[in-house]
Amino acid sequence: GLALLFSVAIWSQVPGRSFVKDSCKNIKSASVPVLEGYPFTCGWQRLRPPGFGSSKYVPYAFIQPNGSWCWSNAGFLDSATPGLLVDTLTDPVLTSTMLSELGELKGSAGNPTSAVGALVFTHPDVDHILGNQAVPDHVPRYGTKETQAEVTAQANSGLIAKMGLGLSLGHFLWHALQVVGGARLVAALPLPVRGYVMKLMGWARSQMFMAEFNFHVVDVARLPALSQYLMSDDQLAVDGTSLPALFKHFGPIHSKSDSMIFLPKSRVVYA
């Protein structure tokens, strides 16, 4: 009975999960200086000034300071016709917000996804693919055969459901540990136990940070289904029009299949 009352008391002190809707929520400062002239500023950033490289095609990057786990970036090669989107964000909500901002940039705020003529994936990690359902199904998806195999494996393994369970458990555990003393509790534990508890706290903290992403709205049936497999040095195209963009595949680096989109004239690489 006392154990149950104690558990209920802790549960009542743990805050509920809140989910992020805005990429700029993660900002800890207005911009982070990384390269001179290229501030690490939230949102769509034009990567090259007018007249640099090709005036017909303009590269943009969507930035999410201050980075960290799953705060990934995306790219867009703009043109007079629908352009090329490079990767999505970690979840459909953040990706929808990103596309809305792209619509404002392109002057199509009423139909923001109309700016996207094709979507290419650089690799199959969740922070680059789980926003896929925010892009209309008719938009062609490109990537490697290995990327598709990994996406299919993730869908069949129940990875998204397992992630959701782990995030909920980690969020609760981290806050529960703070209620009962947190670091002070660890310091008071016998040495043989302390290491195990510190590992548990580290895991719970990592899950707590990721618990604000909208994994619960991801539709596993709408993970990327590639309409065209790419090979290294393939030239990318949208609606049959070739782009000044090359697909470079490097194999497994930090995922099962890592690629880059190289824009030679603009001297830009998306990865």
Image (tube, grey):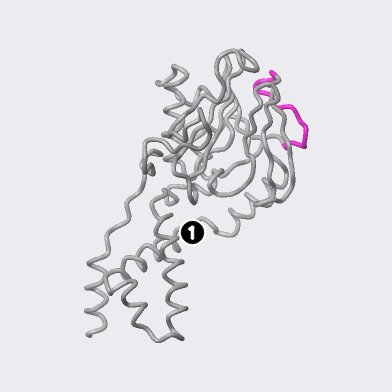
In-front residue for pair 168/48: 48
In-front residue for pair 207/95: 207
Looking at the picture, how far across and down is residue 67, in whole percent? 47, 45
Looking at the picture, how far across and down is residue 262, in whole percent? 69, 31
Describe residue 193's horizontal placement relative to residue 53 as left or right: left
| Residue lying at 44% horizontally and 35% vertically, measured from the top left | 96
Which amino acid, by three-letter code, is at mark 1?
Met
Q: In the image, is residue 80 above or below residue 91?
A: above
Please check the rendered image and state whether residue 238 is part of the magenta-colored stretch, yes or no. Answer: yes
Q: In the image, is residue 37 above or below residue 23?
A: above
Residue, disc 1? 163
Q: In the image, is residue 262 above or below residue 4?
A: above
Looking at the picture, how far across and down is residue 24, in whole percent? 38, 38
* The image quarter in which residue 159 lies: bottom right
**Which image quarter is the N terminus in?**
bottom left
**Which image quarter is the C terminus in?**
top right
| Residue lying at 33% horizontally and 82% vertically, measured from the top left | 188
* The image quarter in which residue 154 lies: bottom right
Q: In the image, is residue 50 above or below residue 135?
A: above
| Residue lying at 39% horizontally and 62% vertically, measured from the top left | 168
In-front residue for pair 243/218: 243
Please check the rendered image and state whether residue 20 is part of the magenta-colored stretch, yes or no. Answer: no
Describe residue 21's horizontal placement relative to residue 163 as left or right: left
- Secondary structure of the residue carrying numbered label 1: helix
Looking at the picture, how far across and down is residue 223, in whole percent? 56, 44
| Residue lying at 47% horizontally and 19% vertically, measured from the top left | 106
Describe residue 263's horizontal placement relative to residue 80 as left or right: right
Q: Residues within 10 Å of mark 1 (few under 14, many from 20)?
A: some
> Exactly how many numbered labels are in the figure?
1
Q: Which residues are magenta?
A: 229-241
